[in-house]
Amino acid sequence: MRTAARIRPKTKAELAKMRESGRIVGEVLAGVAERIKPGVTLLELDAWAEAHIRGRGATPSFKGYHGFPRSLCVSVNEEVVHGIPGKRALRDGDIVTVDCGALLDGWHGDAARTFCVGSSDPESRELLRVCEGSLMAGVAELRPQRRLGDVSKAVEAFVKRESGFAVVRQYVGHGIGRALHEEPQVPNYFEPGFPHADLMLEPGHVFAIEPMVNAGTHEVRVLEDLWTVVTADGRRSAHFEHTVAVTEDGPQVLTLP
């Protein structure tokens, strides 16, 4: 078996910094949850989130990142990830994913959550349940002496066991710290030989685990804005994410309010 290159764990002092940036992200998602309702525009959510992040002494990780124009990624219904907030108003029955990042004192936090807007149909509720459950199945594997590939296996296995939904393969989780995206990549499916799949987890490793689950095909495409990713068949998608540290006592979610 090929040995994975070592990924440097964060120190306890660095983890303490990441807890602070992660807490801000958690606060934003909690605040968004209170504000999501029919008639609210995506720009209104973005403006509130940016004000909260800056009010806490941090900066939005996403704004200006490779030219991204907003502070949140907000993706509605068939949009998978990287939706650009605009004047679109949410409608009863929509599902909406809000992805948020915050940079504080040089350290990033990153998390996402999909919400139902008003009433919701059974398939949408089930899609959210399965996606969030797959995230937590992956998080549970973030323990010393486990391998990174165990996270990928757990996410994929949960989705297959619980549903006929499909895991997105073109977009994956990642390491995180001083950079928003660090090595290694963390796929939400398992294939032997994937880079870093055999990485032995150590206390101090930090990853953004983020399954994206589609109601139909796993295939996606990018719209003309060169950011928004949508499902290839137009069916709905959910996305849940947390920044999580490996500790001697097991996984510690850093992006809670």
Image: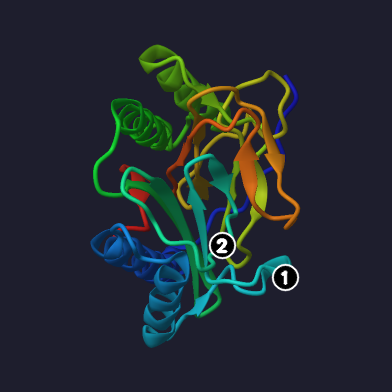
CB-based contact (under 8 Å), mark 2 and mark 1: no
Report the residue marked by disc 2: 177
Q: What secondary structure is found at the residue carrying circle 1?
A: helix
**Residue shown at the point (58%, 33%) measured from the top left:** 234
Determine which quarter of the picture holds residue 18: bottom left
Q: Between disc 2 and disc 1, whose residue precedes?
A: 1
Q: What residue is rendered at 69% in x and 55% in y?
A: 227
Q: In the rendered view of the protein, which quadrant contains the N terminus?
A: top right
Q: Position of residue 121 (x, y in %)?
A: 30, 31
The picture places residue 240, in percent across and down from the top left corner, at 42, 44
Front residue of 236/103: it is 236
- Say what secondary structure mark 2 lies in: loop
Asked whether the viewer can see residue 257, the reply is no
Disc assigned to residue 192: none
The CA distance from mark 2 to mark 1 is 20 Å
| Residue 255 image point, x, y percent | 37, 58
Amino acid type at mark 1: Gly
Quarter of the image where one finds residue 232:
top right
Front in this rendered view, residue 4 or 219: 219
Image coordinates of residue 59 in percent, x first then y, are 51, 80
Type of the residue with mark 2: Gly
Label 2: few (<14), some or many (≥20) within 10 Å?
A: many
**Position of 110 relative to 146 (above/below):** below
Relative vertical location of residue 13 with respect to residue 110 in this rendering, above or below:
below
In this rendering, would 219 be left or right of 156? right
Residue at left offset 48%, top offset 26%: 215
Question: Which residue matches tag 1?
Answer: 67
